[in-house]
């Protein structure tokens, strides 16, 4: 029995809370001297990365190994894919080797859903196009939950996500997760970096208007190629309007968290040394990523009472 | 059985379709249609009698917009399989789009396509020509040479002619030749990388959007070029409410503009892309219910003259790719009648006779096809479609006569199904099956 994790929408609020609770258990495993348990022994997880992402792949790889899963990696550059076999053929070939879960990263929206339709294995979406990145959203939610001690949900918390919302799967999924937990989310961006339809989302193009009221400021990576598409005139102007400068940092509430999905563009969206920001939890996000991805793999592959008892047992050294 | 079919498919056999509802340019009435030696006659001793009770007999359908893929993409469709699909859909003539490889921009290619159509013998294949050489948007195709061999429709379909000066020249130069520029309207800088309609759905899915404005700007430009030059223009596959309104206003101004819409743009919306299936990717894209309603109203009030399929076959492998990588397009010849009746007549927007007109004699006139869309009366060619207007059915992709399977209508109830198609007195489809 396996289940897939494709998006926060499909996981739902109850599913988000289930994963976050499970992540507490995984975080406890990670604090042990021997942070490895046999819960997924005998399971094979394939990391199928059709788009480069060393950080996300390492995080998943570490998570799978701490649960004693066997892992394999299929990484292709986009150029070799375009002249090679189709996504369907690739997936069916790997599935035929006997894979229990695929962790898929793909530049195309919807690719993990297609893969899910072609295989009986569980599929974990590790990022598709500009669309969804549910494990990032879950580790973000877990970081807020632990940093602000909000196990009971995010009611009343004020979040701002600043930057390139339009091209960001992180913004879409993290917004969905924060809202599912009850937070009030505001998107901060010029109209060129917003989706064409913003639905019922709160939006402002003035970070200065909201910065003092925030519990969490979430900065997105500003990519250089956005300049060539005339979406913003230049990075200096972007930083002046949407970056976290020293002046803005001084206006943050003392307990306000500063988050970023990485890698940070120093001097652009983050124009202040994060070491000088008391609320910066950017490294905690990375650390929590392991526990949350352990929770996701465990939830997809082994959420049975027997398997849960395996979490108590260390793997013999 | 084989002998009987062979016998039936020759025009030497006399046929009578009895007690049918006849719908033609003269109106709707009940009656019988006797056929001998390929033409409708006053009466005959029929070799074959077809009980027409409950059936409609009308002039065969004419598709202004068919991609037959040959030459160049024979793995997706050939002229033979495409014209067979046309016959199954009740079509007796199709205008073959020029985005072949090589492009239909020379007499040699155009004549080859026409000959393949005659060889297949399943429907009249009328090749269109491109507006620009190779559809590259740079030099004009030799319109007069192609008009000389019978080409009447010119289009760069798949792309709009971006350069307004070049489009102006195309209108001016072609005006005296008795041909029509048929235009795919898309301002390309606004649609770079676009996968689907720009709106709520694409925002949620994180896909690059194809804004309605990209179509409307070019519809507006070309209406103004028609006003300037006096040359006729036909607008392909209108998809937005504002485009329909622009054409309505141009017609009210007395300009020589015509337009078509596809069965999918009058029935389906961008919400289907939430399935992540590239079956629903098409250009122009499926839009919103507001646009669907406007397209339906445009057909009902005659702003949109014709229903045209934009039949665009693609092999399954290409449509199994993620949305951004898959090619746009849907097959449509075999579902056009069923989709149109279900979404125009059953919805109360239009009369059955309006649908038949928009699929038959109106497009025949726009394509300047003299032996199609004719009244059903003695002496006229027996080029006919016989259909059951009440049958409700669902399409089964594996059973399509087209070589490709990319229909978006799976799971969508269709109303009205073709029983027989006759081309100059020969059955190309008999009892729903192609005769060859």
Image (cartoon, rainbow, N blue to C red):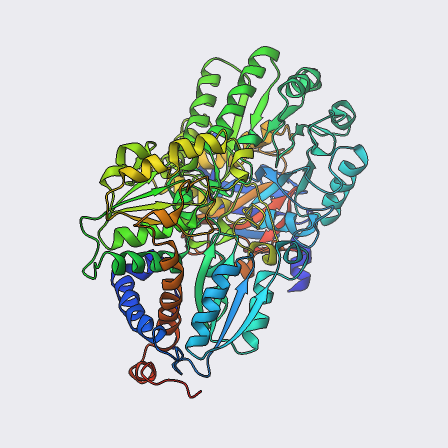
Q: Nearer the viewer, residue B263 or B160?
A: B160
Q: Nearer the viewer, residue B406 or A286?
A: A286
Q: Quadrant of the N terminus of chain A?
A: bottom left
Q: Is residue B323 left or right of residue A183?
A: right
Picture layout, residue B34 above or below residue A57: above
Task: Point out the residue furthest to the right here.
Answer: B108
Where residue B277 appears, x then y in whole percent? 48, 54
Rendered residue at 57%/50% (across/down): B325
Rendered residue at 18%/60% (across/down): A152
Where residue B53 appears, x then y in whole percent? 44, 49
Rendered residue at 34%/59% (across/down): A138
Picture layout, residue A33 above or below residue B403: below
**Residue B236 appears in which quarter of the rendering?**
top right
Task: Point out the residue furthest to the top here.
Answer: B228
Instruction: Specify whether residue B342 is in view.
Output: no
Instruction: Specify whether residue A291 is in view.
Output: yes
Where residue A313 appears, x then y in whole percent? 34, 85
Picture layout, residue B288 above or below residue B300: below
Q: Is residue A155 left or right of residue A46?
A: left
Where residue A291 appears, x then y in whole percent? 36, 68
């Amino acid at each position: 029995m396996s289940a897939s994790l494709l998006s926060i929408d499909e996981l739902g609020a109850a599913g988000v809370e289930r994963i976050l609770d499970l992540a507490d258990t995984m975080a406890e495993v990670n604090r042990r001297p021997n942070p490895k348990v046999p819960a997924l022994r005998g399971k094979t997880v394939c990391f199928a990365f059709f788009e480069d992402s060393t950080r996300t792949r390492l995080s998943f790889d570490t998570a799978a190994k701490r649960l004693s899963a066997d892992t394999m990696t299929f990484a292709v550059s986009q150029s070799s894919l375009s002249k090679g076999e189709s996504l369907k053929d690739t997936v069916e070939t790997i599935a035929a080797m006997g894979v229990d879960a695929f962790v898929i990263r793909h530049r195309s929206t919807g690719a993990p859903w297609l893969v899910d339709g072609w295989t009986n294995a569980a599929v974990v979406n590790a990022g598709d196009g500009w669309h969804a990145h549910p494990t990032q959203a879950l580790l973000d939610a877990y970081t807020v939950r632990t940093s602000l001690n909000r196990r009971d949900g995010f009611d009343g918390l004020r979040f701002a996500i600043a930057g390139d919302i339009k091209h960001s799967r992180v913004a879409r999924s993290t917004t969905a997760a924060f809202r599912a937990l009850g937070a009030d989310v505001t998107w901060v961006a010029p109209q060129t970096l917003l989706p064409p339809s913003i639905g019922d989302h709160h939006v402002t193009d003035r970070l200065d208007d909201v910065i003092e009221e925030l519990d969490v400021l979430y900065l997105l990576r500003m990519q250089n190629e956005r300049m060539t598409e005339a979406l913003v005139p230049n990075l200096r102007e972007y930083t002046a309007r949407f970056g976290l400068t020293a002046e803005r940092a001084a206006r943050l509430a003392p307990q306000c968290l500063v988050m970023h999905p990485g890698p940070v563009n120093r001097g652009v969206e983050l124009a202040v040394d994060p070491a000088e920001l008391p609320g910066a939890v950017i490294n905690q996000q990375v650390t929590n990523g392991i526990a949350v991805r352990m929770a996701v793999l465990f939830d997809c592959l082994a959420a049975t009472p027997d398997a849960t008892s395996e979490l108590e047992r260390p793997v013999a050294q | 059985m084989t002998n009987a079919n062979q016998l039936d498919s020759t025009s030497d056999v006399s046929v009578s379709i009895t007690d049918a509802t006849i719908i033609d340019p003269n109106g709707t009435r009940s009656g019988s249609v006797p056929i001998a030696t390929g033409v409708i006659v006053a009466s005959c001793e029929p070799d074959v009698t077809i009980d027409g009770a409950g059936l409609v007999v009308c002039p065969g359908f004419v598709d202004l917009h068919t991609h037959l893929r040959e030459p160049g993409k024979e793995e997706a469709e050939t002229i033979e399989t495409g014209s067979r699909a046309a016959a199954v859909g009740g079509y007796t003539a199709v205008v073959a789009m020029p985005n072949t490889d090589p492009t239909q921009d020379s007499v040699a290619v155009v004549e080859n396509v026409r000959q393949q159509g005659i060889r297949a013998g399943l429907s009249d294949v009328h090749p269109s020509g491109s507006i620009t050489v190779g559809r590259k948007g740079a030099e004009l195709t030799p319109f007069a040479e192609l008009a000389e061999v019978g080409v009447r429709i010119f289009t760069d379909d798949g792309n709009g002619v971006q350069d307004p000066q070049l489009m102006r020249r195309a209108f001016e130069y072609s005006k005296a030749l008795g041909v029509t520029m048929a235009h795919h309207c898309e301002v390309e800088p606004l649609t770079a990388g676009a996968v689907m309609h720009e709106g709520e759905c694409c925002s949620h899915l994180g896909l690059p959007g194809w804004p309605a404005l990209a179509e409307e700007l070019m519809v507006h430009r070309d209406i103004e070029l028609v006003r300037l030059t006096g040359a006729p223009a036909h607008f392909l596959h209108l998809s937005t409410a504002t485009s329909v309104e622009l054409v309505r206003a141009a017609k009210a101004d007395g300009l020589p503009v015509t337009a078509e819409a596809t069965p999918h743009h009058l029935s389906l919306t961008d919400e289907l892309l939430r399935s992540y299936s590239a079956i629903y990717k098409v250009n122009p894209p499926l839009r919103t219910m507001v646009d669907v309603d406007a397209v339906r109203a445009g057909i009902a009030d005659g702003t949109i003259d014709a229903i045209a399929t934009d039949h665009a076959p693609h092999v399954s492998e290409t449509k199994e790719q993620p949305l951004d990588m898959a090619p746009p397009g849907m097959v449509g010849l075999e579902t056009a009648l069923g989709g149109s009746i279900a979404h125009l007549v059953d919805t109360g927007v239009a009369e059955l006779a309006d649908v038949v007109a928009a699929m038959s004699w109106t497009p025949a006139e726009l394509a300047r096809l003299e032996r199609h869309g004719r009244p059903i009366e003695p002496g006229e060619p027996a080029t006919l479609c016989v259909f059951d207007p009440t049958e409700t059915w669902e399409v089964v992709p594996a059973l399509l006569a087209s070589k490709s399977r990319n229909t978006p209508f799976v799971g969508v109830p269709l109303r009205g199904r073709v029983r027989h198609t006759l081309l100059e007195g020969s059955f190309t489809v008999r009892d729903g099956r192609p005769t060859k």
